[in-house]
Amino acid sequence: MEQSDGEGQTVHIEGVIHKLGDQVDTDVILPGRYLAIRDPAELGKHCLEGLDPGFAARVRPGDILVAGRNFGSGSSREHAAIAIQAVGIGCVVAASFARIFHRNAINIGLPAVLCPDFASAVRDLEEARIDLDTGEIVLGNQTFQAEPVPECVQQIVRCGGLVSYVRKRLETGNESSST
């Protein structure tokens, strides 16, 4: 994953696709028996293990998780988004997200991009590049247009999550919202 310097540069994510289907809920992303775990790295080891036991071992930093409709439905557990981020996924692209999962992803600084066309066209293990600023997703010689990630959300992602974003704004004395 190509990171920005935190000074307004666009975040580009480049990696291998791990494709899932429709209706993947938070109980599948991270089974309830792991909810007592507080260490993100340990949560990552169990990411999607009920659906694909070898998933965590195959993911490399910056890889892209692609899903169909209603990704992250079910329980509102933030653990699911944390496990995805901790295993090394740089971005989740889906045809649609459950509202609470989408918000949890943003809160922890995990980019979550809507692009139904890409989600239906991509195959497992292909490589793609995502430009969060423009919403452009490049897959081989094809380009898909996702909904661009709003600048305020990109700032949260660059800071590593909402808590870090707010902390940085308070430290710099920039308490007023520019969003």
Image: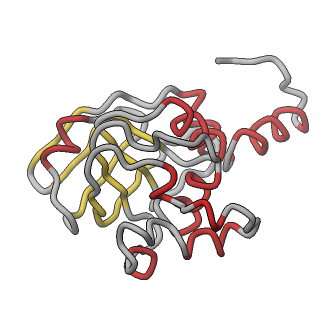
Where's residue 114, x and y in %? 35, 34
Foreground residue among 116 and 176: 116
Looking at the image, residue 110 sits to the left or right of residue 171; the answer is left
Residue furthest to the front in view is 33
| 161 vs 70: above or below | below
Looking at the image, residue 141 sits to the left or right of residue 105; the answer is left
Looking at the image, residue 174 sits to the left or right of residue 61; the answer is right
Foreground residue among 155 and 5: 155
Q: How many marks?
A: 0
Q: Residue at x 35, y 32 (%)?
A: 134
Q: Residue at x 26, y 51 (%)?
A: 21
Foreground residue among 58 and 72: 72
Q: Residue at x 36, y 58 (%)?
A: 64
Where's residue 119, x and y in %? 23, 44
Quarter of the picture holding the N terminus: bottom left
Quarter of the picture holding the C terminus: top right
| 116 vs 2: above or below | above
Foreground residue among 28 and 39: 28
| 144 vs 46: above or below | above
Q: Residue at x 19, y 38 (%)?
A: 144
Where's residue 30, x and y in %? 54, 61
Looking at the image, residue 39 sits to the left or right of residue 122; the answer is right
Tell me which colouring the rendered structure shows.
secondary structure
Where's residue 166, x and y in %? 80, 35
Please identify the quarter of the rendering in which residue 45 is found.
Answer: bottom right
